[in-house]
Image: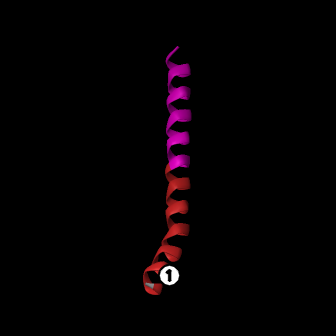
């Protein structure tokens, strides 16, 4: 039982890190275009 629990925790943490990383890369992609839009106005 505890081993199953720790595996579930690892999977959850892994998913969390992946989603954080995906969000970070998405924001990094959005950043230059936003800056470019700011310069246009």
Q: Answer above or below: position of 36 versus 21.
A: below
Q: Position of residue 35 (x, y in %)?
A: 46, 78
* Vertical placement of residue 32 versus 8, above or below: below
Return the x and y of residue 12 as percentages of the image width and height: 52, 34
In x, y percent, where is residue 2? Answer: 49, 18
Write down the residue under mark 1: 36
| Residue at (44, 86) in percent of width and height | 39
Secondary element at tag 1: helix
The residue at 49%/30% (across/down) is 9
Query: Residue 14: x percent and y percent?
Result: 54, 41
- In the rendered view of the protein, which quadrant contains the C terminus? bottom left
The residue under the point 49% across, 63% down is 27
Q: Is residue 30 above or below residue 41?
A: above
Q: Is residue 39 left or right of residue 3?
A: left
Between 37 and 18, the one nearer to me in the picture = 37
Q: Give the magenta part as a residue range.
A: 1-19
Residue 5 belongs to magenta span: yes
Q: Nearer the viewer, residue 28 or 33?
A: 33
């Amino acid at each position: 039982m505890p081993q199953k629990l720790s595996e579930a925790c690892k999977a959850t943490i892994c998913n969390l890190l992946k989603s954080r990383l995906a969000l970070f890369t998405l924001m990094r992609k959005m950043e230059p275009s936003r800056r470019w839009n700011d310069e246009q106005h």
